[in-house]
Image (cartoon, helix red, strand yellow):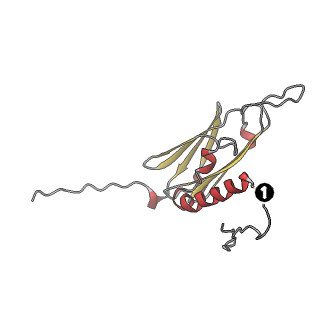
């Protein structure tokens, strides 16, 4: 595992002693290895999507257009006041917070997404450079819509090329 400062941490069991097995420690090690493998190229680690109860991550559609990138994020039950969007030229960070949509009077265990609080922070690394000052965010009917304008050098420019017969 590599920390934020760049130093490598090696987990080794103490010799001569029994160490209880901790499945969550192994999952974190696996998550770190997935992040090392996929994180640089894709901007996310796929392990939380493979394990269902790790946390809430909203479904998102990212559409690359000629002059903009549009993101549609499904956030049912959230309010616009509890959603924060931050943008850099390379990425978009979406942070949301929601209380449970309902609670049982006897405080029994509630199964499903509606009875649990949903706090999340996701970062989407973009393939093109955007202008963070021009980002427009709207929230309607549980869908967050982001319009991310591309910078001039990142806009899609096509040049017709003549094909010569040989």
Whether residue 41 is situated above or below residue 139 in the rendered picture: below
Along the viewing direction, whichever of 7 and 9 lies nearer the viewer: 9
Q: Which residue occupies the foreground of this view, 38 or 62?
A: 38
**Percent coordinates x, y for residue 23 in the rendering:** 71, 52
Badge 1 density bin: few <14, some 14–19, many ≥20, Cα 10 Å: few
Occupied quadrant, residue 2: bottom right
Give the left or right position of residue 39, taking residue 10 as reference. left
**Pick the front one: 68 or 99:** 99
| Quadrant in the rendering for residue 147 | top right
Q: Residue furthest right?
A: 106
- Residue at 71% of width from left, 33% of height from top? 113
Nearest the viewer among 76 and 45 is 45
In the rendered view, tell whether residue 19 sits above or below residue 67. Answer: below
Q: Looking at the picture, how far across and down is residue 72, in whole percent?
A: 57, 40
**Residue under the image location 72 percent in, 52 percent down:** 24
Q: Residue at the location (59% across, 54% down)?
A: 45
- Image quarter where the C terminus lies is bottom left
Question: What SS does tag 1 mark?
Answer: loop
81 is higher (above) or lower (below) than 24: above
- Residue on which the image places disc 1: 20
Q: Residue furthest top?
A: 105
Assign the N terminus to one quadrant of the image.
bottom right
Give me the residue at 65% from left, 33% from top: 142
Q: Residue furthest bottom?
A: 7
């Amino acid at each position: 595992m590599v920390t934020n400062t760049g130093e490598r941490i090696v987990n080794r069991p103490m010799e001569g002693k029994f160490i209880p097995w901790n499945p969550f420690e192994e999952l974190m090690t696996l998550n770190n290895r997935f992040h090392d493998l996929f994180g640089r190229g894709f901007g996310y680690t796929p392990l939380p999507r493979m394990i269902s109860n790790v946390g809430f991550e909203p479904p998102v559609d990212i559409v690359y257009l000629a002059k903009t990138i549009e993101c549609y994020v499904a956030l049912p039950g959230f309010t616009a006041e509890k959603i924060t969007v931050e943008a850099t030229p390379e990425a978009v960070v979406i942070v949301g917070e929601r209380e449970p949509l309902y609670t049982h009077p006897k405080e029994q265990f509630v199964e499903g997404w509606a009875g649990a609080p949903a706090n999340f922070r996701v970062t989407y690394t973009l393939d093109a450079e955007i202008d963070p000052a021009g980002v427009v965010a709207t929230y309607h009917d549980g869908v967050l819509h982001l319009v991310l304008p591309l910078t001039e050098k990142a806009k899609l420019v096509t040049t017709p090329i003549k094909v010569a017969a040989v």
